[in-house]
Image (cartoon, helix red, strand yellow):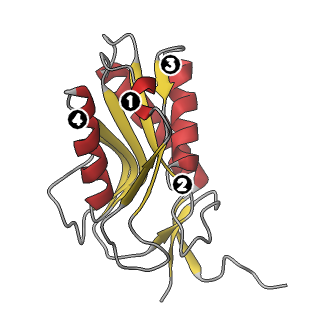
Amino acid sequence: MTDVQSPITELWSEKDIDQAIKRIAEEIDDAYASQQVVNLIPILTGALLFGAKLVIELEILSPGKWKVIPIMSSSYFNTYESTEPDIIMVRDFEKRLDMESPCLVIDDILDSGLTLYRIKELLEGLTGQISSIAVLVDKTVNRKVLIGPDYYGFSLDEDLWLVGYGMDDKGLFRGLNFVGYVQS
C-alpha cells in the first residue's frame, strides 16, 4: 500500500488549526457583538472544513446569530494558474441574505485574491454594506488584486502549493486534517 501523504510536508497541525479557528471565532464574535444576525458566506468547496469548524465555534459563542448561505466558486480548475473565477449561487440567494445584516465571507485561503475580490464586490453590491473576509491562510505572495483578510489563522509569504483542510491539489488531499504543501 502506498503512503498517500508522502509528497506532503506539514506546516500546521490539526491542533494548531483548532487553536487558530477558536481565536478567529472570538475575534469575529467580538467584532459583531452588537449585531443581531450576521450572514456567513462560505465559499465551497475550499471553505468546507474551515467554514464548518468556524461556524460551530461561532454558534458556541453566540447561538442563533449566524446565518449560513454558501456559494460555490473556483479559479483554478485543476491547474496551478489562477483564472477569473466562476461564481455559482444557490437559487434565490438574495432572498436568503438578511439584507440588514453584515456579511462575512469565509474561505480556506486568500492567495491571488481574484475569487474573494469578486465575491466581496458582488455581496457589497447586493447589500450596500461592507463585507468582511475570514480565511484560514493568508498567502501573500502572487496576490493579483489589492485585498486582504479581516480575520486569518496563518500567514504565508512563500510560494507553496497548500493542501489539506479544504485546500487541494487538483481535487486531491482536501480532507487532510492538517495543512501542508506539495513537494515539487
- Label whose residue precedes the other's in the sequence (1 or 2): 2
Give the class, few, some or many, for how many residues have Cα within 10 Å of label 1's Cα (few <14, many ≥20).
some
Residue at position x 48%, y 24% in the image: 67
**Count the marks: how many?**
4
Pointer 4 residue: 124
Secondary structure beneath disc 1?
helix
Residue at position x 51%, y 36% in the image: 54
Pointer 3 residue: 61
Which marked residue is nearer to the observer: mark 3 or mark 2? 2
Q: Are marks 2 and 4 in contact (CB under 8 Å)?
A: no
In percent of width and height, residue 121 lies at: 22, 44
Q: Are marks 1 and 2 in contact (CB under 8 Å)?
A: no
In the picture, measured across the screen, residue 1 lies left or right of residue 173, that is right
Relative to 108, is 65 above or below? Answer: above
Identify the disc placed on residue 171.
none
In the rendered image, the residue lying farthest to the bottom is 184
Three-letter amino acid code of the residue under disc 2? Thr
